[in-house]
Every structure is written in structure tokens, then in C-alpha cells.
Image: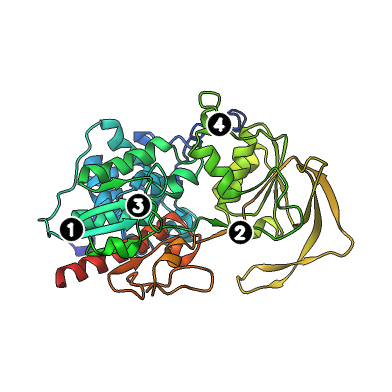
Amino acid sequence: MSEQAKRPKRKPLDLNRRSMPKQPPKIRSHNFYEVALGYQVESAVEEADRCIQCPKPKCVDNCPVEIDIPGFIKCIAERRFEDGVKILKEKNCLPAICGRVCPQEEQCEETCVLSKKKGQIAIGRLERFLADWEARQGKLKLLKRKKKTGKKVAVVGGGPAGLTVAGDLIQLGHEVTIFEALHKMGGVLTYGIPEFRLPKAIVGREVDYLGKLGVELVTDFVVGKTRTVDSLLKEYDAIFVGTGAGLPWFMDIPGENLNGVYSANEYLTRMNLMKGYLFPEFDTPIKNHRQMAVIGGGNVAMDCARTALRLGAETRIIYRRSRDELPARLEEVENAEEEGVIFEFLTLPLKYIGDENGWVREIECLRMELGEPDASGRRRPVPIKGSEFRFQVDGAVCAIGNSPNPLILSTTPGLEAGKKGNIVADEANGRTSRERIWAGGDVVTGAATVILAMGAGRQAAKSIHEYLLSH
């Protein structure tokens, strides 16, 4: 028999990406339940079976936390779900979260070989499937910790970067304490992302997993006020700062101090930490507006607009470029459009106009047109003279970005600051200008994605581990 005859036949390419069921738009636009419903077993197995198991998978190279993607997908295809969960958790302590909110289409899925034929594997949905499958079994299996080293690490900030550092270091045998300023762990996962996109119970489940691994979780503890970083250095061998980017940006236009004009941080925090999504079960101090405008075009802007819509407001997103330039995930844009959010493209806010009681009542805007590309590669918006117009609103949310809170920098001498108020840290390992202090995530880069913060946390954890073993 010839060598060619001995080789197993390749199965034909299946480019039919399995769709994931969602709540119908007319129903979900009136509730805060999760929009995407996840794969059932058969759909997940069919989707996983489409993977051709590349010998040199580029999807892994493009994953910030270096998950063995073909490995866990193969487990799903073979219905070895428990083995798949184990592979996932070796590199990612937050799989249920990443499977829901990470932009896989720009990372692992973008480099899938099948993307050349527009049939890339739904890696994020499969990751979510495994995490949810494990939760349904009611048996949480903990990964084995290495022998205790006797070293202690303090993690400042309980967001995705801090949780990742803690998860990696606890498994490597170090003692880890997370200090979180708010009364719940999770950072942006808890107070920034709406319930309909990332349920709080799922965040709580992932955080509980770290607690069971042995991470000490301390809340209502503001490092920089309750204790300084230098004070913690007397007790801990190393410190990781992952305090995120909680300082909101505004446009600096007239009327921003009017009642009814919010930052995205304030608006989403009121909804999330104060349980506004459970009204009237929880009597939350958030005003239900009738006509809401959201300024911006990123994922946070989509979150704010879809939240306002669910509270009964006619909601508009004001964005100075066109739909093609929106930085938000396409999935989130499509969800917003389906639910009834109105998009005012090529529109620039000029000022807010209030009534005699100091409440916002109108926005004056200017029409734009697209010119040549700018430094971001997107076409630059150019004002159209004489195109000013107004429309009525009784609420507005500014969702144009954030920068880090200055508290840590202002209370930690010798910690180098960047131009935008960020902590300067080595991109490869998270080392800062201070010995025994590392930093990563949004506090270094400015507002970015959950998975990039987790990737930074993973790199910092490796560096901290190497340092602790050598000192």
C-alpha cells in the first residue's frame, strides 16, 4: 500500500459557523437578563469539530494569555469537557468572563486559518461554553498549587489584571492578598459592564474560585488612603498595582455641569454596584430619562446607550465619524441597532443647554464629513460650516474614555508617571521605576480591553515569580 493511501482522508472544510441564540430584541430591550444565551452541547460540539487543528496555530500566538486554544477545542469536539476546562484554567482564571466580553474577533479568531474563507472558529463562544458547563456540574475542581514559598504578594485593585496576577501567583505557591477599594471584587467587570452583557453572578463565581485557591480578598480598602504602597512594602515581598482607569474624560464644552449630564463611570456604576438593574427590588438613586444622548462610539458607549434604553429612554449615540469607524465590537453595535438605539453619525456635540432649574434640555451639535486618515488610520472628521442643529434631551452620558486615578502616583514617591497620568511600566514584564513594585492593565495603558489587562497581569506574574525565587 502506498504512503498516500495510508494517510487518513481530510474531512471537508466546514465554514458554517454555528450561531449562538440570543433573546429577541423586542424582549431583551425591556430587561437586564443576559442577551446571548450560549451554546447548547450539540452546537458546541459541532462548532468545535470544525477546527482543523493546525500544527502551528496562530490563534494561540494572538491570545494575550496564551491559552492552548486547539487543545480545549479538541476536548469539546470529543466531548471531554472536564479536560477542556482544565486546559482553559491552566492559563485563564476567568474563562466565563473572557468568553463573554473579550474581542476575540480582533485577536485569536482574526488569525484563525479559516478566517481567510470567512469561516473562523467561534473561539470565544466555545470558551464560554466550557466555563458554563463546569458551573452547571456544581463541582468546582481546583488546580493544584505548588509548594508554598513563604513569599507574600499584595495586589492593589481587584479588576481583571489584579485577579489574573493573583490567580497565577497563588498557584505558584506564593501567598496573595488583593486589596480592592470598592465593596466587591471585579473592578470594571463588576461596576463597568452591564448585567445584560456580563451577569454579576458570573463575576462572583470567578472571584470565588480565586478565594478557594487561597487568595485573600480584602474589600473597602483604598490603597493610598487606608494604607500607602510603601506601608504595604514593609509587610509584603512584592506589590502589583492594577487599579485601572477610573478617572473619566469630558469634552470640556459648555453645559457639562448641568444636572442630567453624567460620565460613563458614574452612570454605569450607579446601575451596577447599586443594583439599578434590579429596580424596583432595589431602590436605586438613578433617574429614568425620557430622551438620552450618549457621546462616543466604543463598547462603553454601547453599554450606556443600551442601559438607558432598558430604563425606558429614547436613546441616541452621537459619534463624530461614520459607522465604519466605530471602535466598538461589531456584535455590540448590531445588538444596539436591533434593540432600537438611534445612531447620529458624523455629529459633534458643541454644548449642552439647560433650563432655569439647571437640568439639561437640549444638545447643540455640528455635522461632520470625513477627510483624510489621521494617526489612528481612521478618516479624520471635518466640520461642515453652518450645519449646527439641536435636539431635545433630558439626560446625557459622556463615554469618550478614561485615565488612571492619580491616588497611587500621588502617594508613592519615586513611581514614574506618564503623560496621561498612567504609571510607567515595562511592557514585557510590568516592572516600574520602584524596586518590588509592578503594574499592569489600564493603569499603565489607559482604558483598554479585559483580555489585554489580563495579558499584562500574566506577564507581571511571571516577572514577580522570577524575582521572588531569586531573592
Q: Tag 2: Cα neighbours inside 10 Å, few (<14), some, or many (≥20)?
A: some
Which quarter of the image is occupied by the C terminus? bottom left
| Contact check, label 1 and label 2, Cβ < 8 Å | no
Q: Amino acid at mark 2?
A: Trp
Question: What residue is disc 4 on?
Answer: 284
| Cα–Cα span, label 4 and label 1 | 42 Å
Q: Spatial distance from mark 1 to mark 3, Cα to Cα?
A: 32 Å
From the image, state whether disc 1 or disc 2 is nearer to you.
2
From the viewer's perspective, is 141 left or right of 121?
Answer: left
Quadrant in the rendering for residue 326:
bottom right
User: Please, is residue 261 above or below residue 351 in the view?
Assistant: above
Residue type beneath disc 1: Leu
What residue does disc 2 label?
249
- Whichever of callouts 1 and 3 sits on the residue coming sooner in the sequence is 3
What element does badge 1 sit on? Answer: loop
Specify whether residue 52 is in view. no
Residue for badge 1: 172
Residue 323 marker: none
CA separation, marks 1 and 2? 38 Å
Measuring from the top left, give residue 8's x and y in whole percent.
24, 55
Q: CA distance from mark 2 to mark 4?
A: 25 Å
Q: CA distance from mark 3 to mark 2?
A: 42 Å
Q: Nearer the viewer, residue 353 or 380?
A: 353
At mark 3, the secondary structure is: loop
Please give the name of the residue rendered at 42% of the width and 57% of the height, measured from the top-left corner: 243
The percent coordinates of residue 433 (x first, y second) are: 36, 76
Q: Secondary structure at mark 4?
A: loop
Q: Earlier in the sequence, mark 4 or mark 1?
A: 1
Q: Report whether 63 appears left or right of 326.
A: left
CB of mark 2 within 8 Å of CB of mark 4?
no
- Label 3, label 4: how many angstroms apart (C-alpha)? 46 Å
